[in-house]
Amino acid sequence: MKKTIGIIGGMGPEGTADLYMKIVKYYQWNLGARYDRNFPAFFIASVPIPDVVNGLENERITLNMLGKAAIKLQNAGSDFILIACNTVQFLLKPLRTKVKIPIIGIASVTARYLIRAKIKKVGILATSVTINKKIYDQTLKEKGIRLIKPSATEQSSLTDAIMNQLAGQATQNDKKNILKIISRMKKRRAEAILVACTDLPMVVNQIDASIRLIDCTQVYADQAARLASDSKSVISSV
């Protein structure tokens, strides 16, 4: 029997939909899903938290809202939880204390992917909070992986692109600015680039870049699909 996936989303809504559809596509492409019964059950709690792109307005309120969503997903029958947002995952540790079911962390899943891919140095495209809260730093460092971060000017361009995408108004100029950042990271000897914001895959993707882009949402979705499809797997918070 397949496991039930809980998703805390809404940060932003399109990124949540993208994560959901990537799990669905995994089942279609890798597990031969054809009928409704072939897909896992989902519960999605879309949480309208305070702005997390420019900065967290109130961490206590945000944690409280995310905690309530996690409890709802647990009570609904979810076997494990994903968070369709990189930024708020700096709250992962206190959030895990709110529920008894595992909450899967995107940084750990991504780190294991990089190890398998034998990548030792990566650039990162993310929100300023993700960068400043060092959501990926320690996990990657423990695995011997170096992280190349955007400059302050580059981060400002990334924030503009993310905010525009949240409003459904991302432009070709946003894409060009991101590709310039990617090009500069490549010159800094990045072996690949982490697309570590659930809204950015809708703005830039592999076809646009001359260096390998690692969509962290895709890596996260693939792992969730594998966990849900294996009835005998024991899931732990990672």
Image (cartoon, helix red, strand yellow):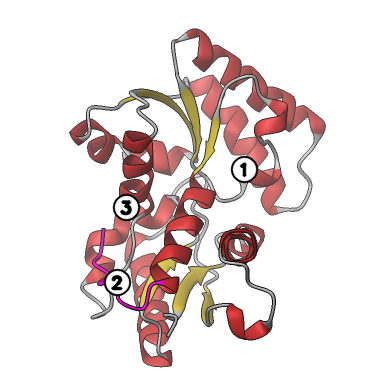
Residue in the picture at 35% in, 47% down:
107
Label 2, label 3: how far apart the Cα atoms are = 26 Å
Q: Magenta stretch?
A: 230-238
Residue 231 part of the magenta-drawn span: yes
Mark 2 and mark 1: span between their CA atoms? 31 Å
106 over 146 or under it: above or below: below
What residue is shown with label 2?
A: 233
Q: The C terminus lies in which quarter of the figure?
A: bottom left
Q: Is residue 89 left or right of residue 157?
A: left
Q: Position of residue 15 (x, y in %)?
A: 61, 57
Residue 148 can be seen, yes or no: no
Hey, which quadrant is residue 93 in on the image? bottom left
Disc 3 residue type (three-letter)? Phe
Could you tell me which secondary element the residue under label 3 belongs to?
Answer: helix
Foreground disc of the pair 2, 1 = 2
* Of callouts 2 and 3, the N-terminal one: 3
The mark found on residue 141 in the picture is none
| Disc marking residue 90 | 3
Q: Viewer-proximal residue, 182 or 49?
A: 182
Q: Which part of the image, by quadrant, shows the N terminus?
A: bottom left
- Amino acid bearing label 2: Ser
* Residue drawn 51% across the image and 78% down it: 45
Q: Closer to the N terminus: mark 2 or mark 1?
A: 1
Q: Are marks 3 and 1 in contact (CB under 8 Å)?
A: no
Q: Is residue 223 above or below residue 132?
A: below
Position of residue 36 relative to residue 233, above or below, is below
What residue does disc 1 label? Answer: 200
Alpha carbon separation for disc pair 3 and 1: 19 Å
